[in-house]
Amino acid sequence: MRLSQMLFVTLREDPAEAEIPSHKLLLRAGYIRRVGSGLYAYLPLMWRVLQKISQIVREELNATGAQECLLTQLQPSELWKESGRWDTYTKAEGIMFALTDRQNREVGLGPTHEEVITAIARDMIRSYRQLPLNLYQIQTKFRDEIRPRFGLMRGREFIMKDAYSFHVDEASLKQTYQDMHEAYTRILKRCGLAFRAVDADSGAIGGSGSQEFMVLAAAGEDEVLYTEDGKYAANVEKATSLPTDAEPSTFTKYEKLSTPGTATIATLCDFLKCSATQIVKNVLYQATYDNGMTVLVLVNIRGDQDVNEVKLQNELVRQAGQYGGKALLALTVPDAEAQQKWATKPLPLGYISPGLSDSYIQSDSQTSKSFAPKFLRLADPTVVELQNFVTGSDESGYHVVGANWGKEFELPKIVVDLRKATVGDRALHDPSQTLQTARGIEIGHIFQLGTKYSKAMNATFTNEQGEELPLVMGCYGIGVSRLAQSAVEQSYDKDGIIFPVAIAPYQAIVVIPDISKADQVAAAEKLYTELNQAGVETLLDDRSERAGVKFKDAELVGIPFRVVTGRSLQQGKVEVVKRANRESQEMAIESVVPTLKQWIAEALSS
Ligand code: ATP
Ligand code: MG
């Protein structure tokens, strides 16, 4: 391709809309253009990158026996109502764009495709003989993200590869899950990315085991906790660890003390000269289920620890049935306005005890329909062993000390891990290892779904014994467009992008320093033709620009190899520059094609 004929516009300045390096560089180098919030056009250079990544994904998935298909982006609401996710996705998370068609039917724009594929499997899979089966597609997904940002990293329209597998049993699912794990590892390696597979939360998709593939980069929105020995890595949403040991309490007698101005753990520790590990902290949440029922939740956790709201959400979903709900619509810390809707009197905020009376919740017939009359009391394991602890007194300005479970306070019946693991914690598998932290960009996510969707949607098969059973399912995603930008986030310098050879839009660029010089043009044209003929994807910079501008653009765009038909032509040579390390050499013109072919082959096989 000739630059003179391309839509090729580069920017010297960083665009104001971009915050992170990869976003700035992709805009500056003319790969993408913003169309609206979270909406980006993939310009010709970007489209080539995306197609290369898609091709690598295809090759590796096809090698596992998966088959490509293409599902509909418009999805009837009925399917999502069958799975029970319509409300979660349109109301709670509100992530699905939903619309009403001219026949007054509700449809959603696909954020993911479990429902559609399960409906197809229900119709087409009858017998164990058809299993296992793994179908995938590469397609634009739509998600009305709360905070679209960082360009392609979090768009409202983006390209995803999603795969769905069907099995007779868990063992078969685990086999495919493992195959996909290996395929993902190969895909990311081939794309030239440094990454880590981590244990992950399964979120609203549901199911049991899941892992995320994280590209490590400072701009990552996710926090990964891992150990040096390489045996543990998890998303902080999911991570577990051993908390530090609690210090023995310095209080021996139960009493209520005046502790003015100690509504936070730090001020309380200061005032009482005690360790935060001696305190039982009581955190109030408000949870609303899809049937409109609101539940007030009181979590007891050790003073030095924080609640992991993802773990809390998962527990609240487990408790949903007890309140007649299926899905959780909202989880918040109730502010003053929210409290007014249900509190009979002002709450002793900052001084709440584990015994906070249910009489704080209004119980008249009006409100009791939509508010559970009792607190849902949950304890994190960190409080169970505490003795003579410090906690609130339910009276503003006062705390109690020397308190014990079974005496002054009753330990909640539900004890569940709700604690946020943090950097520096000891690892469960080996307490001599401490958790380290890193930022990650989630590129891929693999799930063992089990029978969640097949049961809800009645997708069954007949096994060898003639029994009818629900299909066992897995699902596997890769953010293709996010991956493309992550590659840039991991590989750039002050002058621009350094694309890995495997996914660079072009492998080489031939630059004519001065198009008024016939010998420069002739040599460049010849090399350009020969390189392309030899299968080296090559650009020709034949624009009437100054040489300096052309070199700067070539660096910015990040094409791996640059050939310059300049002064050394007299000696039958050209300059060849490697973008990654700027290594430059004069090379005989005849050697250019075989040398570049060899470098590219080496890069692609490593
Ligand atoms: P995140 O936690 O980042 O919101 P997710 O867990 O909702 O992502 P999945 O449903 O697992 O994402 O989707 C599969 C893959 O699609 C993700 O691993 C990610 O690479 C990509 N992806 C998800 N949301 C976006 C988005 N808004 N923009 C670009 N890529 C995305
Ligand atoms: Mg995910």
Image (spheres, rainbow, N blue to C red):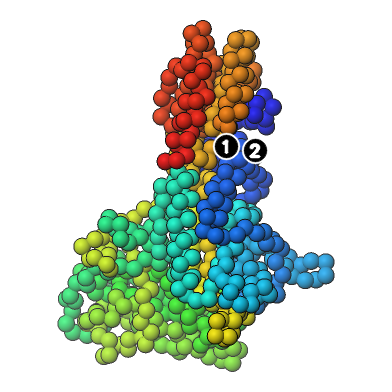
User: Which of the two labelled residues, at mark 2 and mark 1, occupies the earlier sequence position?
Assistant: 2
**Residue at 40% in and 64% down:** 199
Question: Percent position (x, y) of residue 507?
Answer: 54, 32
**82 to 225, vertically: above or below:** below
Q: Amino acid at mark 1?
A: Pro
Checking the image for residue 505, the label placed there is 1
Residue 118, percent across and down?
63, 72
Q: Is residue 305 above or below residue 12?
A: below
Quadrant (top left/top right/bottom left/bottom right) for the C terminus: top left
Q: Residues within 10 Å of mark 2 (few under 14, many from 20)?
A: some
Label 1: few (<14), some (14–19) or many (≥20) C-alpha neighbours in 10 Å: many
Could you tell whether 69 is left or right of 320 in the image?
right
Q: Which amino acid, by three-letter code, is at mark 2?
A: Pro
Specify whether 583 is left or right of 324: left
State whether label 1 is within 8 Å of ligand 1. no
Secondary structure under the numbered disc 2 in the rendered image: helix
Percent x, y of residue 578 = 45, 27
Marks 2/1 in contact by CB < 8 Å: the verdict is yes
Which element is circle 1 on?
A: loop
Residue identified by numbered label 2: 44
Left or right relative to 244: residue 62: right
For the point 65% across and 26% down, the residue is 2
User: Residue at the location (58% across, 85% down)?
Assistant: 466
Name the quadrant of the N terminus. top right
| 59 or 110, nearer to the observer | 59
In space, the residues marked 2 and 1 are separated at their CA atoms by: 9 Å
Residue at (60, 45) in percent of width and height: 51
Please name whichever residue, 237 or 75, is drawn nearer the observer in this view of the structure. Answer: 75
Displayed quadrant of residue 263: bottom left
Answer above or below: position of 601 versus 140. Answer: above
Q: Nearer the viewer, mark 2 or mark 1?
A: 1
Residue 233 in sight: yes
